[in-house]
Amino acid sequence: MFSVVIISFVLLLAVISLTFTGFFSRFNILDSESKERSDELASACIEIARLKIALNNSYTGFDNNVSVGTGICGYKVESGGIIRAHACVNKAATFYTVTVDAAIPNIPILSFEENAELSTCPIVAFF
């Protein structure tokens, strides 16, 4: 009788742990989708900044609230062709630093780097 209780208890624990594993894996999938969306938003802000540089080759400035579809991202263009862009979706943040060559008409990207150490949401001020 005692062994039946122990075996039932072990099976119950196994079922509960498997249930929670499925429950938490749904949140991991949601987090990866949010990170993908923030990545695309930050990339869109980089393209907007490249367009502003193409229209005015000496452009420097920033915009913290660029609406792209249903999301919001921000960018900062610094002298020397450095673009810093960020986006945040459901507490998943993406921060990019991009170097471009403003002297060439199609504004090619020379370097593209993600700044993982700045990955906190919500974004209060531009970095």
Image (cartoon, rainbow, N blue to C red):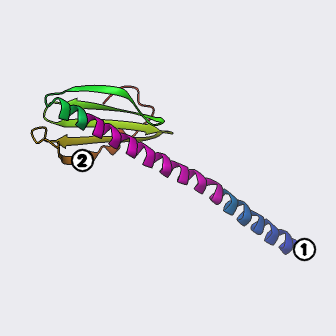
Identify residue type, mark 1: Met
- The residue located at (71%, 66%) in the rendering is 14
Residue under label 2: 112
* Residue 38: quarter of image: top left
| Neighbours of disc 2 within 10 Å: few (<14), some (14-19), many (20+) | some
Q: Sequence order check: which comes first, mark 1 or mark 2?
A: 1
Q: Is residue 96 above or below residue 63?
A: below
Magenta range is: 21-49
Between residues 64 and 124, which one lies in front from this camera angle?
64
**Left or right relative to 43: residue 106:** left
- The residue located at (14%, 31%) in the rendering is 57
Task: Indicate the secondary structure of the residue bearing disc 2.
Answer: strand
Between residues 103 and 9, which one lies in front from this camera angle?
103
Identify residue type, mark 2: Phe
Residue under label 1: 1
Task: Indicate the secondary structure of the residue bearing disc 1.
Answer: loop
Q: Is residue 18 above or below residue 97?
A: below
Quarter of the picture holding the C terminus: top left
Name the magenta segment's main secondary structure.
Answer: helix
Q: Is residue 8 above or below residue 45?
A: below
Q: Give the label on residue 111, or none.
A: none
Residue 40 percent coordinates (x, y)? 39, 45
**Left or right relative to 108: residue 76:** right
Q: Reply yes or no: does residue 38 show up in magenta.
A: yes
Residue 44 percent coordinates (x, y)? 34, 40
Q: Select label 1 or label 2 by which is in front.
A: 2
**Left or right relative to 22: residue 115:** left
Residue 5 percent coordinates (x, y)? 85, 69
* Residue 123: quarter of image: top left
Label 1, label 2: how far apart the Cα atoms are:
66 Å
Residue 8 percent coordinates (x, y)? 82, 69
